[in-house]
Amino acid sequence: MSAEQELTHDAGVHGDAHGADAHVDVHGEVSLDVTELDVELPGSGRVATPDVAEYAMRLGDDSLILSQQLAWWVSRAPELEEDLALGNLALDLLGHARALLHFAGTATGRSEDDLAYWRDEPEFLNCWLVEQPGTDFGDMIARQLFFSLYQTQLYTALLSSGDESLAAIAAKAEREVRYHQDHAVQWVLRLAGGTDESRSRVIVSLNEMWPYVEELFTDDALFDRLEGIAPKPSTLRAGFDETLAVVLAEAELELPTAKPAMAGGRQGRHSTQMGYILAELQWLARRHPGAKW
Amino acid sequence: MSTPGEMGTEAWPLWEVFIRANRGLSHVHVGSLHAPDAEMAVRNARDLYTRRGEGISIWVAPATAFTTSDPDRKGEFFESPSGKNYRHAIYYTQAEGVKHL
């Protein structure tokens, strides 16, 4: 049913009192036919400068790839309840990705779908942490812990960004990633304090993800040009370390010691995992260009 | 309650969930869910039952903590009120000058 038909149908049910723009829906609050997803994008309506667009693309790609990775868990979590929890985290991240990639695309006249489905691997600027395999529950939780701790610091800092679109996106994302952090922390505490098996496995998982943390806090020349707009990643490290220390102390775990990886995600150099992730993410859009549902 | 996972067939314990939609309303039972403990039950309730903005407050309680009326004894439990419509306030004459009854 088209949007017009839906509205006509509603007008018939409710009489003609409602104008053509009345979003009355007899089926409840939300109908896909009448929902304007575009108005849900925080910070839209402005054009990004090339530097701001590159920054938004880095953040948007982080969220997009992690969202795709988490979506794998739907139907595979240990309980139905956790399926929903992980699906919700994935959808939060997808929302951030939409807003950020939409904004990034304004610099070059591309939509968020163009950026998500029609860029190739070297054009993606996400960090290596989000690419890492997380099909083991402990690995996924370790990845979530490090990344949500980082994102909480990041979006808190971005609340006062000089770019109003980034600040608007951060205003929504900051609250959501705080919940992601809480979710990961709760699970780390339970895995560490559960059985001998769960404890030894989460220690391995934390060590496996640790090499990819360094990249999140590495400055480069872009940030010299974004003074007052984007926080230098290195300035976010202290808050990350502080929160992580509290979590590890409560879980009675040691700080992982694995050496940092030579990650180059911000320059478009990716680990071997990335191609497989993109293949699954992009094949449908590329097989049926312009398809709608 | 035993530790989840101790036995291969065992599921997490069941929790009953109550959601309050708005300030001034009371918490309403919305369903039940599985969770390893109370803190996770609140979070699972948030993820299962508030995805469309249904609530601003959540209560959970272990399903085992509830004592219920016996469905097989509905007759003797709930027969008494029928035939006593005078218990509904609408049967009383409204006093003059009372506007918002």
Image (cartoon, grey):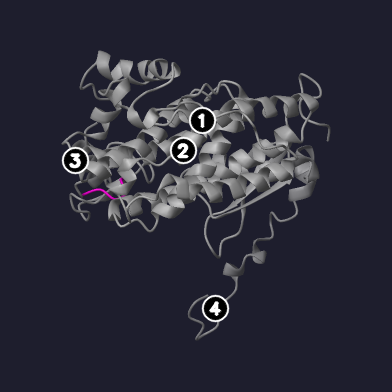
Give residue A107's mark. Answer: 3
Q: Is residue A146 left or right of residue A203?
A: left
Q: Where the C terminus of chain A falls, by quadrant?
A: top left
User: CA gap, disc 1 to disc 3?
Assistant: 29 Å
Q: Closer to us: mark 4 or mark 1?
A: 1
Q: Which kind of residue does numbered mark 4 sit on?
A: Gln
Q: Chain of mark 4?
A: B
Residue A153 x %, y %: 49, 49
Q: Please, is residue B88 above or below residue B68 in the view?
A: below
User: CA gap, disc 1 to disc 2?
Assistant: 8 Å
Q: Chain of mark 1?
A: A
Q: Earlier in the sequence, mark 1 or mark 3?
A: 3
Q: Chain of mark 2?
A: A
User: CA gap, disc 2 to disc 3?
Assistant: 24 Å
Residue position marked by numbered label 1 in the rendering: A212
Furthest toward the right, the residue is B2
Residue at 55% across / 29% down in the picture? A211
Q: Residues within 10 Å of mark 3 (few under 14, many from 20)?
A: some
